[in-house]
Image (cartoon, rainbow, N blue to C red):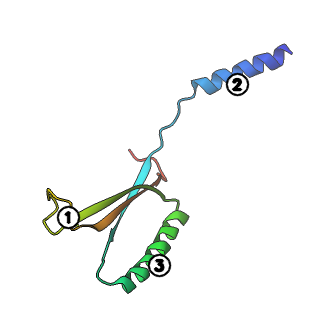
Amino acid sequence: MKTISLLLVLIFLVGCSAKPQKTKWEYKVLTIHVSYAHEASHFRTQSKTDELLTLYGQDGWELYSVTPVLQSNYGYYSRTLQNVQTDKIILIFKRPGKAKRR
């Protein structure tokens, strides 16, 4: 019984003394340009985007952030929200780094 208790204490101490390693991340940015002019081309682009996202997932990439970039007829820094539409969407992916870099 004392041997088991001593072994458990030893395992606990070894586990507590180990430093947690920080994960090094790789990032990839994908910009999707949005077009409202041709509805039919939108579906083709959607299909290609789906295929690309599937490939990213198979390679271990995880979607980290989505940022829409807005555009208006009055410029990017308009004081009014009239005629504002999404010009492009920026997707940021991350995955654990493959090797430590110094």
What distance separates the C-alpha of mark 1 from that of mark 2? 64 Å
Q: Is residue 25 above or below residue 63?
A: above
Q: Residue at x 70, y 24 (%)?
A: 11
Do the residues under discs 3 and 1 have CB atoms within 8 angstroms?
A: no
Q: Residue at x 47, y 38 (%)?
A: 22
Query: On the rendered structure, is 85 left or right of 73?
Result: right
Q: Is residue 59 above or below residue 37?
A: above
Tag 2, which secondary structure?
helix
Query: On the rendered structure, is 83 left or right of 1?
Result: left
What distance separates the C-alpha of mark 3 from that of mark 2? 52 Å
- Residue type at mark 2 is Ile
Q: Which residue is mark 1?
A: 82
Rendered location of residue 14, percent (x, y): 64, 24
Rate crowding at label 2 as few (under 14), some (14 to 19) or many (20 or more) other CA atoms within 10 Å.
few
- Residue type at mark 1 is Gln
Q: Which residue is mark 2?
A: 11
Rendered location of residue 74, percent (x, y): 13, 66
- Residue type at mark 3 is Ser
**Camera-nearest label, 3 or 1:** 1
Q: Quadrant of residue 67?
A: bottom left
Question: Of marks 3 and 1, which one's residue comes earlier in the chain?
Answer: 3
Residue 47 - label: 3
Quadrant into which the N terminus falls: top right
